[in-house]
Amino acid sequence: MKIFVIGGGGREHALCWKFDQEGHEVFCAPGNPGIHEVAHVFPVAVNDRKALLDAANQAQPDLIVIGPEDPLIAGMGDMFREHGFAVFGPDQSAARLEGSKSFSKDMMKRAGIPTARYQSFSDPGAAKEYVSAEYGAGRSVVVKASGAALGKGVILCDSAEDANVAIDGMLVGMEFGEAGRTIVVEERLTGQEFSLLTLVSGQEILSLPVAQDYKRIGDGDTGLNTGGMGTYSPVDWVSDELVRKAEDEVVRPILASLADLEIEYRGVLFSGLMVVDGEPICLEYNVRFGDPETQSVVRRLGDGFAEALLACAKAEAIPEVPVLDGAVCTVVVASEGYPGEYEKGRAIEIGELLDGVEVFHAGTAIVNDELLTSGGRVVAVSATGADAEEARAKAYAGVGGVRFQGMVYRKDIGL
């Protein structure tokens, strides 16, 4: 099969790596230095629709997989479908589940999906009044940019003052641009989180192995939210029964509600879940594979992953994908200062890797034949092991072989 992957981050490197492992011919745009090793790369910007369509017409893929959320939200899936390509990724109408948290929360409410109490605002004064009432009632809040903000538009607030600062930052200071023009103020729940990635072909679903993500920049879940600093899989405390419950109460109802609006979903649905008193509560939906969840999840899958994605793209029955024994741990290595300001262009060295260790590139670039940093999250070191302890030890051994000035990473992934 010929597969064309759109994107150039760590998630896309992991997808390209997996497709290559399965023996498929892989194309990618714009790619990155790691993806160059496993795919034919078109040096085309991810938002250059004409050039991407030209590349697709040249490659003539059997399947197009759109990695990042922004192209999906902008309707790239619709464009490729209109030109006759099989596309794994929802159309623009369904991608609003991630493109607008306000829309997503309203859909959850309509479908009766368990989620935190919330209200949407575009006026800072009204938002602050709501915050005052929430804290007056003894409830803490989370302030979220309604639009897509690369995982950084969620502010956990310890006080009303913190919430007011977040509100002003988004609605007055426009810290997240258009993504923060509307905000969602949501009750802050307490519990353990996990990520559920579900392949969707209309109303048919197939959930992939569960992963746990580490969102905060610092050890012990301290500091600012990021796009994700590491993951591991399997998650021992998430039972098969809990996954089935999440499918029945969080995944299937949202697909049915979309169908009521004559929207057919074809792609992956990422449910961000928190378990409160044993019940799965939906924090958010994303309409693409998680990053860095994907770097762990694809390594737990046997052959047949690409065929399952093709079935979704064609709205056909999804074939089973075998799940491998063992465990995976993935550790993100980032630039000092991330998720805030950071320097680019620092030389990267990657040493010899143990068996079962892969380095997935994200924020890297080749300049004058030298591998340099080009983003906040630079690489993700992913390791397989017979059990979680072995996978974790191998992942951190791999991290020890990565060297660049100012590199930072969490030391508690998988603990």
Image (cartoon, rainbow, N blue to C red):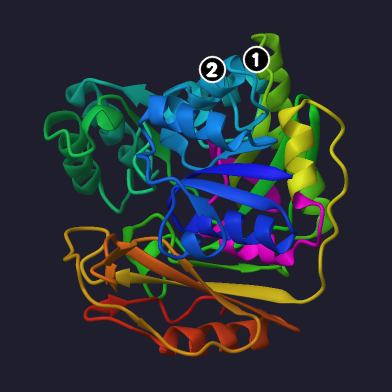
Specify the quadrant that holds the C terminus. Answer: bottom right
Magenta range is 277-305
Instruction: Check contact, mark 2 vs mark 1: CB within 8 A.
Output: yes
Q: Nearer the viewer, residue 345 or 69?
A: 345
Disc number at residue 413? none
Q: Residues within 10 Å of mark 2 (few under 14, many from 20)?
A: some
Answer left or right for 251 relative to 407. right
Residue type indicated by callout 1:
Ile
Is residue 292 depicted above or below 265 in this figure?
below
Please, what secondary structure does the residue beneath circle 1 have? loop
Q: Position of residue 300 (x, y in %)?
A: 73, 66
Distance CA(mark 2)–CA(mark 1): 7 Å
Residue 45 visible in the displayed image: yes
Residue 248 visible in the displayed image: no
Q: Residue at x 54, y 50 (%)?
A: 290
List the residue tagged with mark 2: 93
Is residue 145 depicted above or below 102 in this figure?
below
Specify the quadrant that holds the N terminus. Answer: top right
On whether residue 293 falls in the magenta region, the answer is yes
Residue type indicated by callout 2:
Ser
Q: Residue at x 62, y 65 (%)?
A: 296
Q: Position of residue 172 (x, y in %)?
A: 13, 30
Disc number at residue 263? 1
**Quick one: which residue is furthest to the front in this view?**
58
On whether residue 219 falls in the magenta region, the answer is no
